Image (tube, rainbow, N blue to C red):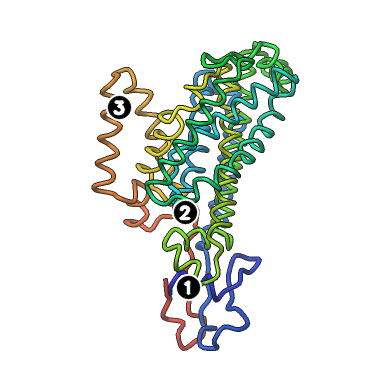
Amino acid sequence: MDLFWQVASWQQNKDGASRPAPDAPQSDRRYESRIGGGYGRLLAVFAAAFVGFLIILPAIASRNAIQDMIFIFYMLALAQYWNLLAGYAGLVSVGQQAFVGLGAYLLFALTIFIDLDPILAIILAGAFAGLCAVPTAFVVFRLRGAYFAIGTWVVAEVYRLVLAQFKSLGGGTGTSLPPSVTNGVFGIDWVKSVFELRTPAARDIVTYWIALALVVGTVFAVYWILRSRRGLALAAIRDSETAAESVGIDNFRTKFWVYVFAAVGTGMVGALIYLQKARISPDAAFSVLDWTAYVIFIVVIGGIGTIEGPIIGVIIFYLMQTYLSSYGTWYLILLGALAIVIMLFAPKGIWGYVSDRWGLVLFPVRRTLKVTTPEYSHKPVQ
């Protein structure tokens, strides 16, 4: 059954199922839309247990392992936001580094000039990135396809040049966070007393927990969106904007809110990244390679248009960066070669291939139409 028929004919129930609209033809009332399978509760229990394990991990893991996990968490969060834009809304942005940089710079400004707690500054940094995404959207949404991708990159460069003019934040060379900021994050004193650690190690644990909260919140929010009516609208727009508009979807409004939502999340992640690094410069904060190219690589090899794909992709990227980055140029060549091989032989990415081959789904967001009347119950429609 066509995706756009679902958008036009059904209303969402509270339990995740859908029912025909009151004015739908009687012949259509034998279908209903369902999301997920019978193992949803089991997966939820497993996910909760895994998150619980990650929460207590600092008690048994080394400091190097904690720092590596922080890297995995924030790269995964960035990948999920980019995947939401490109994989579900069809917005292939090459300028998401704009919101990483904006969030990071606001964190520096708030913590240095008004002595705000860094955790609160991370939240405000996300709000600031979302505000900046509003005028940005009105500019780049006038473009389509490759022009949209290039347009987002150009806007990111404009933001980089603007931030480089602020001498109070280091200008073109950048600046560093004072120790009073990095050591004054809420919770560090408590971690020091409980784990009997020095300040730098305690700071890493607090940063780890913040990164964990961000990535778990990101995955949950993306999953919730994709299972909602807005997720169905996003899929319709991705497949065909003209057809989506013909069944009553406001294309601009739908793309606008998801673009702003991704900017808010990306801004908070950017603030967290540079809270950990404690030093910022325009070239680093607005780096297309670090915060967009690598993110695209993660999503493409893992599986675009799936929540599971970026998880697989970030693990592969971490392993390659850990064990191959010392080879210099060859490291980048191997990254490119892997991406090409995946795109040629598994266009849907590694997880897409696994899912198609064995029918494995960890985060069910795909809707299935099922015939509910007795005379048609043997004919499920997908």
- The residues bearing labels 2 and 1 have C-alpha atoms spaced at a distance of 20 Å
Q: Which residue is mark 2?
A: 88
Q: Are marks 3 and 1 in contact (CB under 8 Å)?
A: no
Q: Quadrant of residue 187?
A: top right
Q: Is residue 274 left or right of residue 95?
A: right
Going from N to C along the chain, the mark reached first, 3 or 2, is 2
Quarter of the image for the C terminus: give it.
Answer: bottom left
Say which residue label 1 marks: 369
- Callout 3: helix, strand or loop? helix
What number of labels is visible?
Answer: 3
Closer to the camera in the image, 60 or 251: 251
Residue 321 x/y as whole percent: 37, 25
Instruction: Name the residue rendered at 30%, 50% in the picture.
Output: 347
Q: Position of residue 152 (x, y in %)?
A: 46, 40
**Relative depth, front residue between 14 and 375:** 14
Residue 332's disc is 3
* Up/down of 142 relative to 327, above or below: below
Give the position of the N terminus as an image quadrant. Answer: bottom left
Q: Is residue 361 above or below residue 148?
A: below
Q: Position of residue 305 (x, y in %)?
A: 43, 52
Label 1 crowd bin: few (<14), some (14–19), many (20+), radius 10 Å: many
